Image: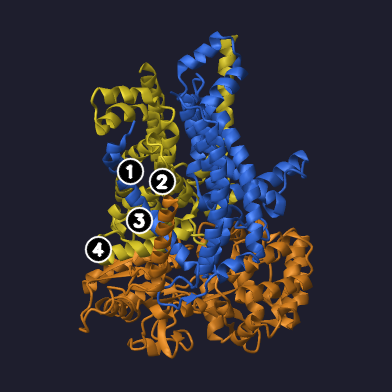
Chain colours: A orange, B yellow, C blue
Amino acid sequence: MKKRRVAIVFLSCFIIAGLLFTGCTIPGTSGSTGGTQTTAKKIIVFQSKVEITDQMEALAEEYKAETGVEVEVWGTTGDDYFQQLKTKLANNQGPTVFSLAPGSESEQMKNYLEDLSGLSFVGKIAEGMANVIDGKVVGIPYTVEGFGLVYNKSMISPDEVKDYTSFVKMMQDQKAKDVNGLSLSQESYFLIGHILNTPFALQADPFQYVADLAAGKVKMADTPEFQEFAKFYAAIRDYAKNPLEINYDKEIGDLATGKSAAIHQGNWCAGMFNDYQLDFELGMMPLPLAGNDCLAVSVPAAWYVNSQASDAEKQAGKEFLTWLYTSNTGKRYLMEEFGFIPVVAGMENKNLDVLSQEVAKYTAEGKTIPWPMSQWPAGIVDVYLVPVAEQFFTTEMTPEDFLAELDRVWVEASK
Amino acid sequence: MKKAGKIAINIIVVALSLIYLFPVYIVIVNSFKNRAELYENILAFPSSVDFEYYATAMQKMSFPRAFGNSLIVTVISIAIIIVLASTTAWVLVRVNNKLSKIIFLVFVGTMLIPFQTLMMPLMQEMGWIRDHLRIPMLDSLGGLIYMNVGFGASMAVFLYHGFIKSVPVSLEEAATIDGCNKFTLFWRIVFPMLKPTTATVAILDVIWIWNDYLLPSLVISSKAYRTIPLSTASFFGQFTIQWNMAMAGLTLTIIPVIIFYLSAQKYIIKGVAAGAVK
Amino acid sequence: MFKKQDKGWYILFTAPLIFIFTTVVIIPFFIGIGYSFFSWDGLPLNPKVFVGMENYVKLFSDGRFLSSAIHTTLFTFLAILLINLLGLIFALVVTTKLKVRNAARAMLFMPYLIGGLILGYIWKFIFGDAFSSIGEQIGLTSVFFNWLLDSRFALYALVIVATWQMAGYIMIIYITGIQGIPEDVIEAAHVDGANLWVTLFRVKFPLMMPSFTISLFMTLSNCFKVFDVNFSLTGGGPNNATEMFAMNIYNEIFQLNNYGYGQAKAIVFFIVVAAVTLYQVSITKKREVVMV
């Protein structure tokens, strides 16, 4: 009897301790340490774009040589980046400078984002590209990226694929030649995330539409662009290989070897073709949903400074970003080494890969639609949308049922 | 006749093992191919076997340092786990009271907690220890070793507990009469008899600690302390994976474990042979 | 063995490990329980709202969580059977006097070392391309098709891959058990004229009971917590048909940012699993033969 009582006392102590621990946040020790404008001698950069990891390391060495400030670059697989960033920020062992996707991701983290409005080059950032939260510029854009149909110029012509009817005809013609007219692949964003962005972007006010959808005020099933999207999706199911059997590598390989005429991808995939000897030209064209003639172009990631770092570290982080966007070395890295499309005035990239050139061309012509997907509820693509797409591609689900199911999970995800 | 049969059995066992190893074959051949070759035929032999991807992978991983860090973390963690878990398990078996039973059940029960639910509070606690007690639990090899010991404790205690039961008590009693204290009794008499279990614990823990990614990825930030799985992480992005590097990196990671396994398993057999003399 | 005055030894031998274990596992676990009463996204600067038992009430009407429970149970049941059967057979084969036993051991044990994306990639290829082409060639398309696209077969595919991974791992424990049987006992059985099967079932297996307890428990805990294989091979698909507990919890915490709710799920999951396993351990423990 006595033992049991002791056990109960122990257990309740633990629970109380647990509650205390959870209830009151331990104030960070690395917070403000004096108001002097000193600059730290070392900053830590953690960023999600794995493709530029090696170049970041080289950049860090040049920065040290030029300014004497050490830059440590943390590694990531990219997949678990956000999870690691959150865990590290939560324990005051966060990096000084980090990257996020502007939108619901940066919105969630806004308490950790330092105001960068005062940086010298902020005024030169292209219209609407900086991440502004509560009237303050907090995120400096990396670049712009665009997606649409990446296609084989010797197999299809954009002039012949302008709307649903001509799209279906193209799919049928290619199928007759045993070629995939348009291929998707099984990875979440390549399966449904990016392609579903288009009907959102075609709404009169795309971002308002996302909000209304979450509030249950509108339904995809009642919106014409979405109805047509479902028909496009059905055409892919009818006339192309099942995207669930194709991975990113295979999607690229199929296009490179002439087994697909087009894939739904963005300019980020240009590097994937390096190992192939292409005997045709690659191009990018819009997904002709509801007559759409624009590529979906936006900022995939932006730089942020950790507001919880010490003042000296924050200062060093800001100086690093300023250097990156204004010094000759920094600009050279952004343009030549990272291969970015310029988003800040005074930069030019003459060596863009062929797909980025197309994105830059569409951007210059103003033929772009936004990425309302950046405002979708967190995690919705992987956790809610992919299962519906999988159901669509493995069963006889009708386009109407498909939309109804998307509506249903959307409400669930928005709760 | 009998000899032919034996050879046949040997061949069958090898053949079955090879089928079982088919996926490993895929890893190895594809560590020599570029993206286009991989797409062409995932099963084919590579057109040329040169070790350029291995060289690049080793260089990008800072292999010598990562290897050193992994070695330090693995060896020290396992040494501590073995010392502490064997003594704990022995006492818990031999002192057969309620408290021992409860402690044992708590150890075993926690093996069922998914790590994902512990990681956030654990990091918070360790951050608190670092900030308030000034013990560098985060971003240090020592901290990682400490946490490895904590997470490895359950399984090791469980394994030792299971096998200590089959060790006869009579020997220990005799030694006690001879005037051994508990400390010498354990290390002189009991621990040597547990050699097979110790080898088993060491093997299972090497597999786990050497390959562990999640915990080190949270604990270690600095480049100087990266273990092998952390240093290969950049090859493994879902959207950026370079298969040849990733597979070369994986091969480099597992070869030491296999070598270790082959040398350690002898102790399982030797240990028993030694025990049988008793 | 230990008497009252040996208390000091008891503490000396157990306290260090218990201390480390408490700080690393027990305290975070209780902090986690604390969080399960909050609605929170895991970031300390963001608001934490105390919601009491709401998270716990909610999960019993969470259809997806409940069906992940069913998948996990089914998966665990099948995987435990296969892993232990195969692991035991492997162990018996490689402890014979075969010349190739050492090479075979190393080979069988290798799969456990391949995880993550690469595992998913390889097995997706085998179930996709390889199965389809085998099916077409030998005309058995009812067996050889892409298992990962069928909601029932995708679960079996997971069982197969988990077995492939874990059987060699569990083999190690069975080997230890088999090697631990004193030679003289086996010889005595031979002298008494026992054949292979009798030796196996009447002599070896009863003496290997600790190995069975350990192996069953370890497979049980590994299968219930299965994440890697689930994540990289099916990602829970098609249409959530293979989403397991750990993945459901992972999604809740890290994808949907519902940290408190995810913790509540984890606690309930833990209680259920602990009840099942402790029951299992207590059954097999009773069958162990204690050597005196």
Does residue C24 appear anywhere in the picture? Answer: yes
> Left or right: where does residue B260 sit relative to residue C118?
left
Going by the numbered disc 1, the residue's amino acid type is Thr
- Find disc 1 in the rendering and name its residue: C14
The quarter of the picture where the C terminus of chain A appears is bottom right
- Find disc 3 in the rendering and name its residue: C23
Q: Residue at x 25, y 22 (%)?
A: B178
Going by the numbered disc 4, the residue's amino acid type is Leu
* Mark 3 vs 2: CB contact within 8 A: no
**Quarter occupied by residue B199:** top left
- Find disc 4 in the rendering and name its residue: B133
Going by the numbered disc 3, the residue's amino acid type is Thr
> Left or right: where does residue B265 sit relative to residue C288?
left
Check if mark 4 and mark 3 are on a common chain.
no
Q: Give above or below for C198 relative to A123.
A: above
Check if mark 1 and mark 2 are on a common chain.
no
Please state the chain letter of the residue tagged with numbered disc 3 in the rendered image: C
